[in-house]
Amino acid sequence: MYILNEASKKIKVSLFITCLVDILFPQVGVSMVKVLKRLGVEVDFPEEQTCCGQPAFNSGFRQDAKVLAKRFISIFSQDGFIVSPSGSCTSMVRVFYKELFHDDQKMLDVVNILSSRTYEFSEFLVNVLKVDDVGATYNGRVTYHDSCHALRELRVQNEPRKLIKSVKGVDFVEMKFPDTCCGFGGTFSVKFPDVSVSILDEKIESIIESGADTVVSTDMGCLMQIGGAINRKKLPVKTIHIAELLASV
Amino acid sequence: MNSNSREEILKRIRRGLHRLAIVRRKDENISPSSSSYKESQQKLEKLHKEMDERRLLLLDMFMNEITKVSGKAIILKSEDEIKDYVIRLVEEHSAKSLAIWESDFLKQINLREFLEIKGLKFASLNSKEEMAEADIGITEADFGIADTGTLVLIANEKQPRSVSLIPPIHVAILQSDVILEKMEDVFAILKNSLDETGSIAKLTSCITFITGPSRTGDIELNITLGVHGPKELFVLICP
Amino acid sequence: MEDIKVNFEKNSATALKNANLQRALKNAIDQFRNVRGKAVGEFEEWEQLRASARRIKEWTIGQLDEYLEMLEANVIKAGGTVHWASDAKEACEIILDIAKKHNVKSVVKSKSMATEEIELNHSFEGAGIKVVETDLGEYIIQLANERPSHIIAPAIHKTREDISKLFVEKLNTPYYKEPEELTKIAREKLRSEFLNADMGVSGVNFAVAETGTIVVVENEGNARFTTTVPRIHVALMGIEKVIPRFEDLSIFLNVLIRSATGQKMSTYVSFITGPKRNSDLDGPEEFHLVIMDNGRSKILSHEETRESLYCIRCGACIYICPVYKKVGGHSYGWVYPGPIGAIITPQLLGIDKAHELPFASSLCGACKDVCPVKINIPRVLLELRSRVISDRRVGAGFLLRIAVRLWRFTMENKGIYNLASQLSYFAQMPWIRHGRLTSLPFPFSRWTKKRDFPAVAKTSFRKQWNEIKDLEG
């Protein structure tokens, strides 16, 4: 049974959908909306949004990143929470915007407030809405991959696991070293593809060893990397985002 | 040339830290967790008291830890037991030549004389060639650290460093009333044998912490004992 | 040092194809992770200790000039001599000078990354002075004429078979495969070196300003030999190695040893204050401390990357790095491998000499979490990436700049973004196989060579929003 918090009728969420989900994995966004609505949250989508600027920041193009960051900040200026289906993009806003504007006190003040409103999807459900069981059903042997940013920048580790274990029909297994990088690292995956794939191979080995038929994560970047190899090797494993898992009934 | 470099380096550091003038900081504020001389004296007293009250517990801890690092610790109850044990070791290892400290406790129990009577030769302590021929090195330990099974050896005119280093077997006599719990405790005692101005006159040329026999993991991270230092360590603990 | 240029792409490609290396790395690293996990896990105060260590380093580096002066004064008080070297060349000159003045014919060395930095052995050999590495791992790579591939276990990339073959070739010994036998050979060979050397050169793990004490941490006993038997002891340290007080050692020894080898305490820790006293029966007659800058003051002057100097050279970040595990130490092209190498090599050699290194990371942050002094390595890497891009000598390639400009323009304009999104849906058509993209033209081929790429969705999320926004829960 899922808990409907009467108070959440007042909770407003602006969706920070991320360009990756918007263009490549829209079903993740749709799932997120379904789950949030099921929990009685008021959801809105600021249509001007495009990108938070992380790819530029990670590649060393700080000026370009700043431009997109300022744009993001002005688009998400209203009240309420900002929730994203990506630990990586959430980290950019919550952690690295402070880095980007570290020598600009005025921007820093704005960014600090913005940070306090910005959440990754699974931590929002567990820590803000105080919900573990969202009434989902999924039959399968599920393992969870910790995305590096979610784990080490946002300290999101228990929340997704709590949510997964509460899904009816799920047989949860922990893979060996779930917190080891999958080798994606954004542009790293194409800048040093051989190293990236070599790291990925070890992750795939862990997944196979775990006996799971489904891999879940908070980040489509990781799942794109993992799924990319799984598909190439034609392995009997599905990759789904945690929002998709929680939306299934 | 050299004194120029000194000035250059210090200048670069100061510039890098945006320090325009040398600001002399008070010694008490030297770093975040400073304590005054008085506080450390008080701590010393407390330590000595603890050592006394917790003697058995610390001994137990020490025995446990040293075994974990492949050291062999034996509790002996008298001078005679010590001498007998040393003789046993000499026989088991067919030792012909020994090296021994001229330190207080070893002198007190006349260990060297006892062994000389048994026909054993002793290496001259300032000859590295003779030291290299010695089969067993016998020392005391100035302190023991229970937490890690560590021996603390302070070098001075009666306690040369090589005796616990060059011979392949090291025998250390440790009195149970100098076993402390942690490394911090040893530092507190050592530090406070300095005077109030922090003079290092009493901090000797070398203090060595020894925790078990010599080892390496450099080949495939596989642990092997007796690389350069002693291959075997015996700690004879007496009251 | 000036003519070094790091080629990570090339080096890593070679490393990935070396099956022997891959096996050696995996074996050593999996083992180490287990051991370290236990050493840190059992220690409840670990996080507190890390915080204290960081605080002390921040403080000390913030007053570095004062602490170095204090250190110098106390070393001199204890009867030692202090030398200051601005760079590698000067450090070598100073040490060679000491050797020549004292008619030194042979030198024994214990492990010191600083001496690798300045290529000291090369200088000794050039002057006709014999120098022998005495740390077993360093001895092995000296025989193999290689650079160390890890700062704590320099020969980690070699299997026992590699080492046996090396000993047979260089030392004329029979073929022994077991580590015990190999170690015995090294012990015998090195003993006579120790006893006959005129000078011992060591590194410095920590230098205590308050007492003028240098601390050397080890397991083998070779550093004890190096700093006890020869009549002259020279210790080389980077300016950042100084710590304020004697008691700070309890924090630093704890975090260093547990991080470096997973032990509670290393076999030997030597606290050396000056040369032997007149009444001592052994110990060196002279003690020389060489304090070296070699680019560290430059790092100090950049507040954003200053924390690179807090490093205590434990090697934990190297062990935990998923990139290092695949490419090994030599890929990093210089003395320091792994995450710490990726941040200090560009800063010490010059960003143009090692511009790939800040990018040779997936930014996973595992290093940040294990660092005993809490250096935020990913943050420093990101800062260095931006320095590479704005550096006139390297910068970004012309094409990349155009691509980034275009990309940014797209992201700044919702209309263009939507158009691009639409266009990419159609553009991918020729390459769609079973709903996925299995091979794409350059530069996307860099992805699709070994992985499938997802297809652009027919209807983007924002297009679907209008339908779903009024849905009930």
Image: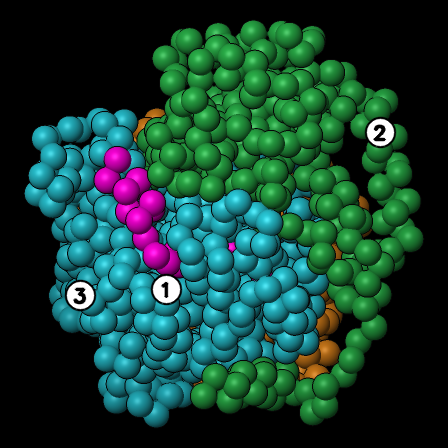
Chain colours: A orange, B green, C cyan
The residue at the point 56 percent across, 87 percent down is B7
The residue at the point 69 percent across, 9 percent down is B78
Chain of the residue on which disc 1 is drawn? C
Label 2 to label 1, Cα distance in Å? 44 Å
Element on which disc 2 rests: helix
Label disc, if present, on residue B50 of the rendered structure: 2
Chain of the residue on which disc 3 is drawn? C
Circle 1 Cα neighbour tier, 10 Å, few/some/many (<14 / 14–19 / ≥20): many
The picture places residue B45, in percent across and down from the top left corner, at 89, 38
Circle 2 Cα neighbour tier, 10 Å, few/some/many (<14 / 14–19 / ≥20): some
Classify residue C175 by image quadrant.
top left
The residue at the point 57 percent across, 25 percent down is B172
The residue at the point 85 percent across, 49 percent down is B40
The residue under label 3 is C10
Q: Which residues are magenta?
A: C188-207
Label disc, if present, on residue C115 of the rendered structure: 1
Chain of the residue on which disc 2 is drawn? B
Element on which disc 1 rests: helix
**Residue C320 vertical placement versus B195 (above, below):** above
The picture places residue B200, in percent across and down from the top left corner, at 71, 58
The verdict on a common chain for dots 3 and 1 is: yes
Label 3 to label 1, Cα distance in Å? 26 Å
